[in-house]
Each structure stands twice: as C-alpha cells, then as structure tokens.
Amino acid sequence: MVLRDQDLKGILEDHQNKTVYLFHFGCLVAVNSTKYDLSDLYNYLCKIGSASSQNVNHLEYSDSYRLDIQSDRELEVHNNFMVVPKLLDYYPQIIAIVLAKSVALDRIEDNVEKVSDEIEKIIDYLDKGKLNINDNKLAKLSAKILRYKYNTISYVMVLDKPDITWYREGADDLFLRLADLFDLQERFENLRHKTENIMDITEVFTILVHAQRGTRLEWMIIILIALEIVISLVEKLI
C-alpha cells in the first residue's frame, strides 16, 4: 500500500512531499520523513490496528538510505546513498522494497539468534548429563523455526522480484544492485542454513527425550514384574 502526501493529511503534521510504503510483512518505509514522522505513523497504525502491537518497539529495527539527484552525474549506488541524474518514478519504490526486506531480515535474524541461545542452554544441560526438556517446549522450538523459515520464504519473499521489474526498463537492474548491496541473497542463505541446523538439533533432542522416556517405561515395567514376583513368593511362603 502506498500513501501519498494527501493520504497522510491528519496523520502527519507536515505531510507535504511525503510518501509512505506499507508492506504486508509488517514494515513501513517513509520517504522525506523524520523519526518523529515515523513515530506518528506508528501511533496512528496502532490506533486502527491491534492493541498488542503497541508493545513493540517500532524503532528497534530500522534503516535508512538517501537518494541524491545530480544532473551532472551518472547513476551510482553506494552503501548509504544513491546518486541519479534525474528522478524516475520507480526509484523510491525499489529502494523502499529493498529497505523493507532488509529490515524484515534483521528482525528474523535476531529472533533466530534468540532461539539459538535457547538451544545452547539445552546443549549445556546435555554436557552435564541432564536433559530437562518436555515435548511442549520441543514443539514450540520447532514451531518457531518453521515460522521463521516460512516468514523468510513465503511472507517476506526475500528473493522475489517486485512486479515493477517486469515492465519498467532499468527497474530490474536497480533492484538487483540494491539487493546485492544489502546482501539479501547471502543473508537469506545464512538464515536458511541456521534454521536447518537448529531443526536438526531439535530433532536430536526429540529422539533423546523419547529414548529417555522409553527407558523409564522399561524400568517401570521391570519394577512392576519384580514386585509381582515378590508378591507371589510371599503369598506361597505364607
């Protein structure tokens, strides 16, 4: 969804020459805006959205990129800014899409690291000969990893090109250059590798837990059989 300056009237104090791109995976990109504008936008979205979203630090994951227009220069893509001889209508859109995907990846990467920390704690218990984890916790860990994999591939669609690249000359090249600049492909592959490794470790935990439970059941059966034998012997002696 794209909100132009007139659409932002009543939301931002100064809405002139400003544009906001809203993405379905929970990111927004504001053009010609300040942090105060972002705060106002976020508060407005909270009012019309779920109340629970107000508990999220909306500036925890953020990034910025500058577009400079200089008529005597060729198109140049740098780490923090881009120089163009004239403004084409698809430039802000392509930049917004790449920025949104990058910030979404930041959030997913952070969440995967938190899960990795949980896994590391369980491994520490295993080093001490302990395995204190139940099926519910294992299921929740697996669900988190699957959710992050789904978000990256199907929801954020990191590797998918925007529709505009198919019908605007130059849009595809710009998208690929910016995607390479923000390492979208490499970060996606790293995330995929990490989530697969964590899932493999979680499967090992599941096997160990089930084996531990099976061993307990076997001992319980042995104890019950032994008790039954003892009771039978006592009854014969009596």
Image: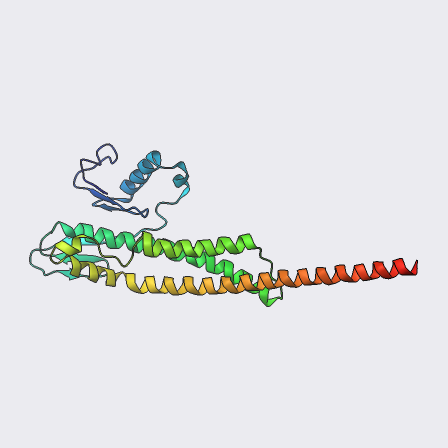
The quarter of the rendered structure image containing the N terminus is top left
Residue found 65% across the figure and 64% down from its top: 215
Q: Residue furthest front?
A: 236
Residue 183 seen in this snapshot = no
Residue found 20% across the figure and 58% down from its top: 175
Which of 193/212 is in front? 212
The quarter of the rendered structure image containing the C terminus is bottom right
Looking at the image, is 95 positioned above or below residue 176? above
Q: Residue furthest left?
A: 72
Residue found 47% across the figure and 65% down from its top: 200
Q: Position of residue 28 (x, y in %)?
A: 28, 46
Image-quadrant location for residue 132: bottom right
Residue found 59% across the figure and 61% down from its top: 210
Which of 48/148 is in front? 148
Q: Residue furthest right?
A: 238
Residue 75 seen in this snapshot = yes
- On screen, residue 152 versus residue 116, left or right, reads left
Q: Position of residue 83 (x, y in %)?
A: 14, 57
- On screen, residue 216 versus residue 203, left or right, reads right
Q: Position of residue 32 (x, y in %)?
A: 20, 45
Image-quadrant location for residue 56: top left
Looking at the image, is 69 positioned above or below residue 181? above
- On screen, residue 222 versus residue 229, left or right, reads left
Q: Position of residue 130 (x, y in %)?
A: 62, 63
